[in-house]
Image (spheres, rainbow, N blue to C red):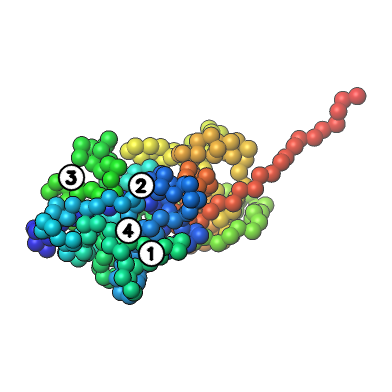
């Protein structure tokens, strides 16, 4: 790809979603940027909700607000309404980490100076109104990354983190040649395999009365969790066991910027369901920004499966990376004895 085309990159800041394929109930548009604009209308989706939806072989991309784009910075001519052959990089703030990352891109896109009203057969509508779009590209040239911290991992710095970082405008033009080259390399190196799975709904907690099997399940679950957090998918963290300290979690997963307090639960069944002790539940609520529930199912099989639940502050609930919601049912217990006479 030529140096001229490599310099034509536009970054657009949007709300966070899993699929961007329309206003699905399980895929709201997240983020304070979106919320400020729509809170009074109690709407759950922004215009960007359709950004990766196939419409006649094309994707039509929108962003919050109505600010225009300086297409001359992208090689457009003075007075022109659009510029072609732009790499449009969509980024958003991850609600799990609070950091902005690349979520997807359009290659060979047309970018418009101001929002373009859809013509017949173009674009989408939301809440009964047509959605004007800022960028257009063939669907085959559009790539959305899977909603996991490992796939959506390329950081986009804000102006407080680095001089020249993105600010309040939805438009951003990068940090110079070296940064843009890193973006190109990141995009060109990706293998394109991004598949999401959803956990099933739990029914009832499994019961295991065999102490030997119970110990084996627990050990296997700890091993799976440790391997996950040691791996790039889990953040390449250093893992230390604190199981014997009765802290309300089992592992410290130590990263470059934070330490996760990981409570590990293992079950031999297929459903991700477990019971928390009063101490664990208290720490879950006390440290919800860093406390993680890691449930491993099929622990006695050759293919155990893991579910990592983290707290989503904007939704006030615990979720997996692909949108599985943790159902919490509190139980009341008591200790009873004979009163002395």
Circle 1: is it few (<14), some (14-19), or many (20+) Cα within 10 Å? some
The residue lying toward the viewer, choosing from 311 and 264, is 311
Disc number at residue 313?
none
Distance in Å between CA atoms under marks 1 and 4: 12 Å
Residue under pointer 2: 93
The residue tagged 4 is 62
Asked if 199 appears above or below 230 in the picture, the reply is: below
Q: Earlier in the sequence, mark 2 or mark 1?
A: 2
Q: Residue at x 59, y 39 (%)?
A: 281
Q: Which structural element holds mark 1? A: strand
Q: Position of residue 199 (x, y in %)?
A: 52, 60
**What residue is at 53 percent from the left and 57 percent from the top?**
297
Q: CA distance from mark 2 to mark 1?
A: 26 Å
- Give the spatial CA distance, label 2 vs label 4: 16 Å
Mark 3 = which residue?
A: 175
Sequence-first disc among 4 and 3: 4
- Which of pointers 4 and 3 indicates the residue nearer the eye? 4
Q: Nearer the viewer, residue 53 or 308?
A: 53
Q: Nearer the viewer, residue 255 or 332?
A: 332
Let me know if residue 15 appears in the view: yes
Whichever of callouts 2 and 3 sits on the residue coming sooner in the sequence is: 2
The reply, left or right, for residue 65 in relation to residue 141 is right
Q: How packed is label 3: few (under 14 Cα within 10 Å), some, or many (20 or more)? A: some
Of labels 1 and 3, earlier in sequence is: 1
Q: Is residue 207 left or right of residue 171?
A: right
Q: Position of residue 295 (x, y in %)?
A: 52, 51
Residue at the image point whose x is 76% and y is 35% from the top: 335
The residue under label 1 is 130
- Percent across and percent down for residue 242 are 49, 36
């Amino acid at each position: 790809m030529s140096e001229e085309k490599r310099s034509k990159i536009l970054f657009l800041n949007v709300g966070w979603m899993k699929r961007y394929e329309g206003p699905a109930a399980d895929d709201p548009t997240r983020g304070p940027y979106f919320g400020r604009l729509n809170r009074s209308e109690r709407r759950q989706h922004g215009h960007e909700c359709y950004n990766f939806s196939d419409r006649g072989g094309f994707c039509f991309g929108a962003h919050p607000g109505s600010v225009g784009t300086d297409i001359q910075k992208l090689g457009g001519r003075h007075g022109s309404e659009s510029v072609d052959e732009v790499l449009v990089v969509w980024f958003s703030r991850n609600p799990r980490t609070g950091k902005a990352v690349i979520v997807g891109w359009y290659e060979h896109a047309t970018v418009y100076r101001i929002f373009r009203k859809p013509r017949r057969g173009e674009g989408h509508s939301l809440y009964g109104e047509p959605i004007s779009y800022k960028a257009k590209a063939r669907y085959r040239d559009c790539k959305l990354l899977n909603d996991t911290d490992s796939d959506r991992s390329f950081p986009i710095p804000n102006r407080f983190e680095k001089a020249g970082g993105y600010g309040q405008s939805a438009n951003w033009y990068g940090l110079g040649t070296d940064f843009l080259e890193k973006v190109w390399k990141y995009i060109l190196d990706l293998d394109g395999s991004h598949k999401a799975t959803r956990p099933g709904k739990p029914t009832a907690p499994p019961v295991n009365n065999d102490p030997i099997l119970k110990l084996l399940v627990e050990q296997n679950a700890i091993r799976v969790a440790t391997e996950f957090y040691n791996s790039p998918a889990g953040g390449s963290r250093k893992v230390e066991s604190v199981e014997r300290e009765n802290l309300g979690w089992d592992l410290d997963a130590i990263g470059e910027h934070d330490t996760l307090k990981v409570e590990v639960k293992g079950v031999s069944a297929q459903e991700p369901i477990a019971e928390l002790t009063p101490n664990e539940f208290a720490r879950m609520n006390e440290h919800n920004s860093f406390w993680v529930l890691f449930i491993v199912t099929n622990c006695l099989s050759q293919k155990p499966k893991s579910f990592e639940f983290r707290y989503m502050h904007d939704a006030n609930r615990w979720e997996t990376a692909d949108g599985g919601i943790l159902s919490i049912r509190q139980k009341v217990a008591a200790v009873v004895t004979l009163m002395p006479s």
